[in-house]
Image (spheres, grey):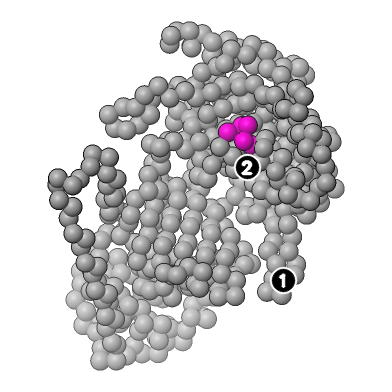
Amino acid sequence: MFGKRGPSDSSSIQPVPAKPAAAEPAAVPAPERRTNQVIAPEVVHDAGAPKRSAAYYTMKSAIFSALIEAIDIAQLGRLDQDAAREEIRDVVNDIISIKNIVMSIAEQEELLDDICNDVLGYGPLEPLLARDDIADIMVNGASKTYIEVGGKIQLTNIRFRDNAQLLNICQRIVSQVGRRVDESSPICDARLQDGSRVNVIAPPLAIDGAALTIRKFKKDKLTLDQLVRFGSISAEGAEILRIIGRVRCNSIVSGGTGSGKTTLLNCLTRAIDLDERIITCEDTAELQLQQPHVVRLETRPPNIEGEGEITMRDLVKNCLRMRPERIIVGEVRGPEAFDLLQAMNTGHDGSMGTLHANSPREALSRMEGMISMGGFNLPVRTIREMICSSVDVIIQTQRLRDGSRRITHVTEVLGMEGDVITTQDLFVYEIVGEDANGKFIGHHKSTGIGRPNFWDRARYYGEEHNLARALDESERRQAGAA
């Protein structure tokens, strides 16, 4: 044992008073209920985080305080995970023995896991991070943690000791990517080691304690074939998306928050040849490309003096000097839209990006607005002509009311008619009903376009036969369903 001071006796540890339980809301009388009343979701008791009493947290807090007094944290940080865990196990066992705390072996192991997570990991978040079925983790202060599973938000039993522990874990997460969150810099974007996106907003901006949001990535990378199995796109639509990525069409993936834009972009990049040089530009690095020749760039916020900021536009302009074959922008949200369009139109075919929009037509308007707000003194027609000559395809994603995610439009940008940008849909998703479980019933249907605008490009890359086959199969399937 190293740097260890003997754990203090039980009289020196003051129990942490439990917070009084909130009063139960009064029940609504049956006659006043309406059939369309929204019912609050039931609390989910996760297998990795069973419901615990206030006495458990009081005991854990006391043992944790004694542990901190008994070990040298600096020396503990020099050990690997396994050795540090064994060291903590020995100290915790000594504390339990000295304090005459009665608990079973299973309870002791559970307590040990909790304390090790607090000292070495991300505390109560560890069991949620280990689950691959969770898409989002949303922590609203120390006492409330929500998760998204299957497109639905659910309340869990996860809770933190206090807001100080929550803020400490937030600081631990963001410090790993060289960022910080505190009162002077209360908003921060960061990422976990697996690429999961993290956003933290701390007091005084967050009134009830730090708000932590984690957009988790699945350990197994999704493919277009898996999207077909999930019903996000038809098999023929997936083949057309693969061809779009293969023949170097400039593509924009648009959709709302949480609609699956980044996941779809990852799927599209699998069609890129292994010998192509790809450069990605992101605010928070989350793209998971599988090609060997990838350069990943990430923006940098200003330091405490307000200096040293590297914007997305700086990255996009710089990567043009890095001999890219494809440029992929994780999310277009500002004047970098101008530089991305310039890159798409100057020999970097096959570039891609995502942006927030609710329809392909709105995506075009959003790009136009981003360029205008960037201070570029250009006529509206010039901006629209630039968009038409740069963007080939817009792929629209949407998260539906039942929690499912669908690719709702595959739309080509054709050109200009007067001052209006013209488009045509290749595939659209049509909702035809709803089943007894509240899940939407729908199907992807072809719009009957037999010769897409990128046909010549497909011929150049030898994909015209596959493209024709996918379009014909879609027509046959649609005729059979009718």
Residue nearest the viewer, comparing 56 with 148: 148
Could you tell me which quadrant the C terminus lies in? top left
The image's mark for residue 355 is 2
Q: Position of residue 478 (x, y in %)?
A: 48, 12
Q: Is residue 451 above or below residue 289?
A: above
The image's mark for residue 306 is 1
Kind of residue sitting beneath label 2: Leu
Residue nearest the viewer, comparing 169 with 35: 35
- Asked if the magenta segment contains residue 298, the reply would be no
Helix, strand or loop at mark 2:
strand
Marks counted in the figure total 2
Q: Position of residue 31 (x, y in %)?
A: 14, 45
| Residue 121 visible from this viewpoint | no
Range drawn in magenta: 359-363
Residue nearest the viewer, comparing 189 with 97: 189
Residue at figure coordinates x 50%, y 51% from the top left: 215
Residue at figure coordinates x 41%, y 42% from the top left: 151
Q: Residues within 10 Å of mark 2 (few under 14, many from 20)?
A: many
